[in-house]
Amino acid sequence: MELTQEIASSFARIALGHVVQEYPNKLDHVLANDADARTPRDLHPVFFGSFDWHSCVHSWWTLLTVRRLYPNIPEARDIEALADVTFTQEKLGAELAYLDRSESRGFERPYGWGWLLYLHHEATRHDDKPWSAHMEGLARGFAARFGAYLPLLTYPITVGTHGNTAFALVLAREWAQERDPELLESLDDWSLRAFAGRSDYSGWEPGGDEFLSPVLIAALLMSRIMSRSEFAPWFNRLVLANGWLERECHPVTVSDRSDGKIAHLDGLCLSRAWCLRGIDYVMSDSAASPLLNQRIQSHLEAAMPHVSGDYMGEHWLASFALLALLERGNTA
């Protein structure tokens, strides 16, 4: 299954419909006093839509990515016009001012941090527009937070939801590769210390509200950092030799797509497909490749029909579908 113009247009229409939809809204907001009781649009003049801040960020990543890949589709003009009035210096300055509040130290950590850097990384590819330049200060603010946070993080957070460390680092290192060699070195060194010694995975997944596989997202991160000769035996020790990938890694059941937490499980299928595609790029000449490809296909087939439908999935799933459909591997 590959990205087509038709699929890209449908993703763009979905995202255009909700990046400016303020309500319903789930804020990540610490109030210091009565004056801090403000509306989403007032707090976040750029990222007020899509149910929550991070979903709005990565829905904008979806829109800009579609605009770059398919510049001649009708939706591209709508994306461009909306981005022009959204990614202004004034509005992005307000987002940075929010980030600089003392109460915002843990704001969107680390999921939103990684997505904002990934959005800025995409914005730099649109050199006909000033969007990336206007976003630079906000991106640098989040990059600085990664640099300050990782030395304090003694253990990786391996949940299947927003707190997951490996997921954020996959996105952040894409940004750092071209812009911040010191941060890139810090991310990679920390990741190797956290994951390179892991083996014989036997975690209890999926959990009932997960949209990430803790083991596969860590493996995707390692596939970005390790050489091919290092990664293949590591991945074998992690999930192939003990049979976990063959025995446990199957598409999941989503019982109620109107429940925001249960709807996360459609995202699990999509993110697993994304991770497995990246891993297969490294393992393509191994005996595991047929199994990897079978799992990729089955997970995509299970989730792609549900990218749109109920708002609890619709406000974010297209981004994860796009990650999966675009993945081509990015090894050291």
Image: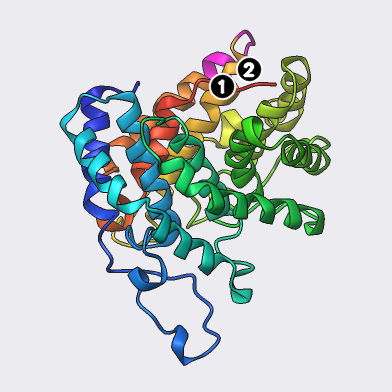
The amino acid on which the numbered mark 2 sits, given as a three-letter code, is Val
| Residue at far top of view | 285
Q: Please name the residue shown 58% across and 28% down the image.
A: 246
In this rendering, position of residue 105 left or right of residue 50: right
Residue 177: horizontal and vertical position, in percent? 65, 31
Q: Whole-Å distance between the Cαs marked 1 and 2?
A: 7 Å
In this rendering, position of residue 64 left or right of residue 31: left
Crowd around label 2: few <14 · some 14–19 · many ≥20 (10 Å): many
In this rendering, position of residue 245 left or right of residue 25: right
The amino acid on which the numbered mark 1 sits, given as a three-letter code, is Gly
Task: Answer whether residue 244 is visible to the viewer in this image.
Answer: no
- Image-quadrant location for residue 12: top left
Q: Quadrant of the N terminus?
A: top left
Magenta stretch, residue numbers: 285-291
In this rendering, position of residue 113 left or right of residue 47: right
Q: Secondary structure at mark 1?
A: loop
Q: Nearer the viewer, residue 142 or 304?
A: 142
Residue 268: horizontal and vertical position, in percent? 46, 44
On the image, numbered disc 2 is attached to which residue?
A: 282
Crowd around label 1: few <14 · some 14–19 · many ≥20 (10 Å): some
Q: Nearer the viewer, residue 48 or 52?
A: 48
Task: Answer whether residue 31 is visible to the viewer in this image.
Answer: yes
Q: Nearer the viewer, residue 58 or 163?
A: 58
On the image, numbered disc 1 is attached to which residue?
A: 329
Residue 290 falls inside the magenta stretch: yes
Residue 281 falls inside the magenta stretch: no
- Image-quadrant location for residue 214: top right
Residue 172: horizontal and vertical position, in percent? 61, 42
